Image (tube, rainbow, N blue to C red):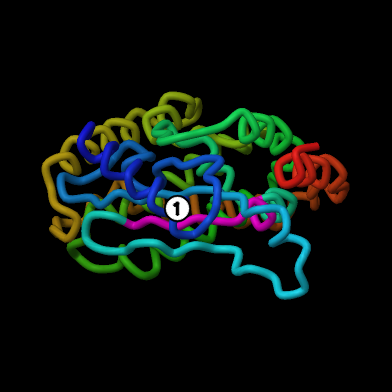
Amino acid sequence: MKKMEMIINEKLDEIERKEGVRILYAAESGSRAWGFASPDSDYDVRFIYVRPVEQYLQLMESRDVIEWQLDEVLDINGWDIKKALKQFARGNATLFEWIGSPIVYRTTEEWKRVQEVSKLYFCEKAAVYHYYGTANSTLQEYLQGDSVQYKKYFYALRPLLAARYIEAYHKAPPVLFGELLQSEMEMSQEIRTAIEELLEIKKRTTEKEENPQMPVIRSFIESEVERQKEIADHLTDDHNKDWMELDQMFREIVCGG
């Protein structure tokens, strides 16, 4: 892991040099951040960057993403700070996961202030719809056969537990699957035991390996997908439509005040 951290930071330095940007924050996303990586899982690195101020003052806007590398080991891409702040305003649940990652490669004082401001823009309705949609897509696309890739169970279970966390605590859920599992108050012992068994198996299996369906897990996913869709449909729109704090953060970061 230490060797990979060094390689990743070298890549981030290379991005800054070649793209002429400054990276404010970089962290792991995906299965390694969630706490259920397979032995052959890749590294999903996400970063937020800022360009020189003059590039925000020109008529021709710069591209707001950097897609740096995608192979069997590394998946590295980032968002411009302007794009990131807009996505906070829209309640983008994926972005809230990036900032809550337990594996941070680099950060700055500016980004720590962004993290504080972002709490004003967490949107329950947007997040629950996101997690419901992710779980339902996984269920329909990957969990219908007699045998399945066990990692796909977690791609449905984790968003469903995140949605249940929001239902209970009304704030952004933890990123680590283990923390979600511990915070879940109303789960039967049967389900909890099955998930813990699944976690142990997942640690020993590769990404594409298939195993027989686990009926207890499958049944929980199916019923919870239906329940979360019902909850999301009835939540009121709680988007924070006042962008003043985000505008101020943008000026501070780009202009220095």
- Please state which of residues 154 and 76 is positioned toward the viewer in this rendering: 76
Residue occupying image coordinates x 37% and y 39%: 33
In the displayed structure, 45 sits above or below 72; it is above
Q: Quadrant of the C terminus?
A: top right
- Please state which of residues 116 and 257 is positioned toward the viewer in this rendering: 257
Q: Is residue 83 magenta?
A: yes
In the image, residue 82 lies at what x, y percent?
69, 55
In the image, residue 101 lies at what x, y percent?
46, 36
- Please state which of residues 233 and 155 is positioned toward the viewer in this rendering: 155
Residue occupying image coordinates x 47% and y 51%: 16
Residue occupying image coordinates x 69% and y 62%: 55
Q: Is residue 194 left or right of residue 17?
A: left
Q: Quadrant of residue 24?
A: top right
In the image, residue 165 lies at what x, y percent?
56, 35
In the image, residue 224 lies at what x, y percent?
49, 49
In the displayed structure, 19 sits above or below 254; it is below
- Please state which of residues 145 and 154 is positioned toward the viewer in this rendering: 154
Give the residue at mark 1. Answer: 17
Q: Is residue 182 left or right of residue 238?
A: left
Residue occupying image coordinates x 85% and y 51%: 241
Q: Is residue 15 magenta?
A: no
Work out whether residue 220 can be spotted. no
Work out whether residue 13 can be spotted. yes
Q: Residues within 10 Å of mark 1 (few under 14, many from 20)?
A: few
**Furthest residue toward bottom:** 60
Tag 1: amino acid: Arg
Q: Quadrant of the N terminus?
A: top left
Callout 1 secondary element: helix
The segment highlighted magenta reads 75-84
Q: Quadrant of residue 146?
A: bottom left
Q: Is residue 186 left or right of residue 86?
A: left
In the displayed structure, 24 sits above or below 17; it is above
